[in-house]
Image: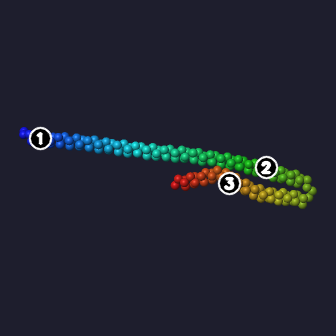
Amino acid sequence: MSGSKAKTVEAVATDVAGATTKGIEATVTNLNDGMAKAAAGLGETQAKVKEGMEKVMKTAEELMAFSQGNVEAFMKSGQIWAAGVQDISKQMAASAQASLDETMSTFKALTSVKSLKDAMDLQSSLARSALEKTLAESGRLTDVSFKLTEQALAPITARVTLAVEKFAKSA
């Protein structure tokens, strides 16, 4: 080969080697950039997943606490109701005992009456007294029952109010 042709082949070989090196370097750079972007994307995805899991766990904890509060409210309501029904039952038993005592007194008095008019007056008095006491007792029992219902529902009503406030904030 002549000198100029050898220089040309050598120059071409140098150019090819240089281009190949530049191509490999560009490929390595592109691969490094791609891997860096993938790692950054993976890190970002992991952060979002972690954040989402933390929110889910916090929500689950809040729901558990709220549910526990609901159970406690129902328990308290049941206790109030049971105590109130027991008190009402005691009052009704006392009223029935007083009514029975009055009836027995009237029957004892009937055994010693001297006239039919006295007997009719005693029976009439007993009937009037029983009716008046029944009306008064039923009114009082109605009032006590309404108050008991309000007291027993108060813990549940408070929980419903809290739920409405809590869910209105989160919506």
Asked if labels 3 and 2 touch by Cβ distance under 8 angstroms, the answer is no
Label 2 or label 1, whichever lies nearer to me, is: 1
Q: Seen from this angle, which residue lies furthest front?
A: 3
Q: Is residue 42 above or below residue 163?
A: above
Horizontal side, residue 138 vs residue 11: left or right: right
CA–CA distance between discs 2 and 3? Answer: 24 Å
Work out whether residue 127 can be spotted. Answer: no
Write down the residue under mark 1.
7
Count of picture labels: 3
Q: Residue at x 73, y 56 (%)?
A: 143
Point out residue 90 in the picture as x, y percentages from the top left corner: 75, 48
Query: What residue does disc 3 label?
Result: 150
Inspect the image, locate mark 2, and give the three-letter code of the amino acid beneath it.
Ala
* Nearer-N-terminus badge (2/3): 2
Residue occupying the point 92% across, 56% down:
114
Pick the front one: 75 or 64: 64
Is disc 3 placed on a helix, strand or loop? Answer: helix
Asked whether residue 113 appears in the rendered view, the answer is: yes
Q: Mark 1 or mark 3: name the one nearer the start of the chain.
A: 1
Label 1 environment density (alpha carbons within 10 Å; few <14, some 14–19, many ≥20): few
Of badges 2 and 3, nearer the viewer stands 3
Q: Nearer the viewer, mark 1 or mark 3?
A: 1
Q: Amino acid at mark 3?
A: Glu
